[in-house]
Image (cartoon, rainbow, N blue to C red):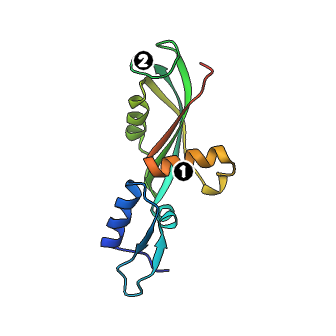
């Protein structure tokens, strides 16, 4: 199978970051076209982080400061990359959460994105880099 390289990869990566959905023309002599969604799935995957964190005064959530809540983070990562707890923690803390504790981490199998809600979380993470779900029931 032919895979785009060089300038085609750079252009596609820029389009992905910009959230555009279009066709990418590879620089290979076969000049094949790849739909951006397919190309995106070839180079990216979603890492899932499950944990708890405390609400801070910087948070936009309507929960008492200091109250701990479970969260689920969908984080876009390069395919076959190691889990990056530092990046995950930065994403969670930007939402006004602190005292972050991870309890589980894994890679999301796209075949498991089998309902509309999960599809929305997955697509948002692929487009914007992450999706953070904060559960309402405190721990």
Dividing the picture into quarters, in which one does residue 18 lie?
Answer: bottom left
Position in image of residue 133 (x %, y %): 55, 34
Residue visible at 38% across and 40% down in the picture: 87
**Please, what secondary structure does the residue beneath circle 1 have?**
helix
On residue 83, the disc is: none
**Residue, far left:** 7
Tell me if mark 2 has few (under 14), some (14-19) or many (20+) residues whose alpha carbon lies within 10 angstroms of its own.
many
Residue 4 point in image, percent of width and height: 40, 74
> Position of 109 compared to 6: left or right?
right
Q: Quick check: can you spot residue 93?
A: yes
Q: Earlier in the sequence, mark 1 or mark 2?
A: 2
Q: Is residue 35 above or below residue 128?
A: below
For the residue pair 23 and 131, the one nearer the viewer reads as: 23
Q: Is residue 98 above or below residue 10?
A: above
Residue 36 appears at what percent x and percent y?
47, 65
Helix, strand or loop at mark 2: loop
Give the answer, above or below, for where 139 lies relative to 27. above
Q: Which residue is mark 1?
A: 123
């Amino acid at each position: 199978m032919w895979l785009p390289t060089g300038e085609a990869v750079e252009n596609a990566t820029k389009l992905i970051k910009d959230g555009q959905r279009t066709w990418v023309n590879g620089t290979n002599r076969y000049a094949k076209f790849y739909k951006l969604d397919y190309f995106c799935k070839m180079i990216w995957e979603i890492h899932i982080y499950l944990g708890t964190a405390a609400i801070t005064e910087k948070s936009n959530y309507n929960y008492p400061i200091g109250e701990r809540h479970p969260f689920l983070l969908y984080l876009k990562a390069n395919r076959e990359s190691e889990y990056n707890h530092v990046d995950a923690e930065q994403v969670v803390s930007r939402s006004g959460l602190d005292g972050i504790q991870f309890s589980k981490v894994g890679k999301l199998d796209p075949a498991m994105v089998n309902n509309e809600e999960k599809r929305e979380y997955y697509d948002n993470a692929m487009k914007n880099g992450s999706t953070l779900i904060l559960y309402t029931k405190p721990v």
